[in-house]
Amino acid sequence: MKNRDIRWILIIAAFAIAGLILMQVNFINKAFELNANQFNDKVSLALITVAEQVNKNKRDSTSSIEAVEQVTEDYFTVNVNDTVNHRFLENLLHLEFSKYGVEADYQYVIYDCFADSIIWKGYSNKPGEEDLFTVNRSLPSYVLPKDSHKIGVYFPGKKQYILSQMNVFVFSGIGLFVIICFFVYILYIILKQKKLSEIKSDFINNMTHEFKTPISTINLSADALGKPGIEKNPERISRYAQIIKDEGLRLRNHVDKILEIAVLDADTPKFKSEPVDMHEQINKAVEIIRIKIEERNGKLETNIHAEYTVVKGDADHLSNILLNLLGNALKYTEKEPHIRINTKNEGKYMVISISDNGIGIPKKYKKYIFNKFYRVSTGNVHNVKGFGLGLYYVNKIVKSHGGSITVESEPNKGSTFSIKLPVIK
């Protein structure tokens, strides 16, 4: 699948997810509003009936349909023509709210306009944490006009009660959220698998290229050795034999690299555990790499300042990580190479830094360079050989020895790889 197709799929998926979320939020809001309106209507009808029963009990048939007022979202008042006995009112409220299906807890008050105060306060159940009213507290005139008696009912948990009646909508919202999370996870897996597929394809292409060249050279040399009359030219025999030997060694090195990674990826890779002087390993690596640097008119500097240099680990693998980093410094430098090796101690660690003046690594690629098979993209140009296993190997070995590795790099200015290993003081 092309990157452009993947990009369009992601854009469409993002819009689809955003649309579903907005629709669900709007759906829940509308459902909440509908339930709130139904609740308000039920409370209003119940209070109208209560007021009519109070007035009837007082032998007053005046209608109170227009007298119900919703002062706030959770506070309702209704006019009555006289004060009412609190026990009688409590029974009426309980009866009418039950009849209309209003099961939320509430507080109620009786207001006497002659005394201009609340003369009684009660609860449908036990008092809640939030208490709007206080006995004998005078309410504002716009709430309770002084020319009428009133009954006030307050629902402190109205929002929670309405939400509890919307379990289906809440569960549907949670279900949609889970589905969206699962969908996003699937997209993540698809992208990750696509990336792994691309990396493995690059690895196979690189491996084919790396193996094809020495095999072709060996075949050409073998054909030359098989030509009639070659036995009369011992110098040519010796030269072709040396070519076959060198290319065979090159193939063996490639195979060894792949086998090393296979061993590292095992559940319990085995390493030696012995004292290793890292300065000695640095000196050995320098002697191996120095000839290649001098062939390119480059220079190699060593600044050895670490006092404690002995670590506990596998000498062969620790030597290999130095050779890998030095080989990369040389391989990724197009001009005359200038490589610097610095050592120092930081607390219980020895720090080995290898710097070069190479092509550097763009910032966006730095977090991937220690991944297996990963190589910084160079398009269709394969002027730098390798499998993308070297830094993965280095990172695995350093971590298995209790250390860490970091990189600082700028394109066209070079890179510095720093290894921290715990030392034996």
Image: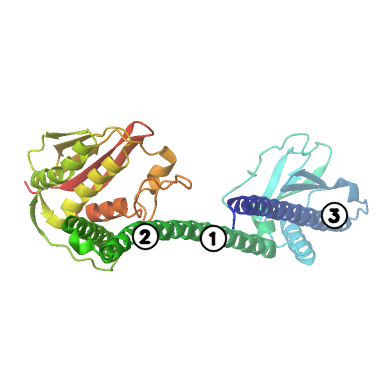
Disc 3: which residue? 48
Residue 358 rendering spot, x and y as whole percentages:
32, 35
Q: Are marks 2 and 1 in contact (CB under 8 Å)?
A: no
Task: Confirm whether residue 105 shows in the render.
Answer: no
Q: Which label sits in the foreground, 3 or 1?
A: 1
> Residue drawn at (23%, 56%), measured in percent from left and top?
243
Q: Secondary structure at mark 2?
A: helix
**Sequence-earlier tag: 3 or 1:** 3
Q: Secondary structure at mark 3?
A: helix
**Sequence-earlier tag: 2 or 1:** 1
Amino acid type, mark 1: Ile
Within the image, what quadrant is residue 272 found in?
Answer: bottom left
Disc 2: which residue? 212
Please rate how many residues cluster around mark 2, counting C-alpha atoms within 10 Å: few if below 14, some from 14 to 19, many from 20: few
Residue 295 rendering spot, x and y as whole percentages:
21, 38
Residue 213 rendering spot, x and y as whole percentages:
35, 57
In this rendered view, identify the residue nearer to me: 234 or 76: 234
Within the image, what quadrant is residue 230 found in?
Answer: bottom left
**Sequence-earlier tag: 3 or 2:** 3
Please rate how many residues cluster around mark 1, counting C-alpha atoms within 10 Å: few if below 14, some from 14 to 19, many from 20: few
Q: Is residue 110 left or right of residue 275?
A: right
> Residue drawn at (7%, 38%), measured in percent from left and top?
307
Amino acid type, mark 3: Ile
> Residue drawn at (23%, 52%), measured in percent from left and top?
398
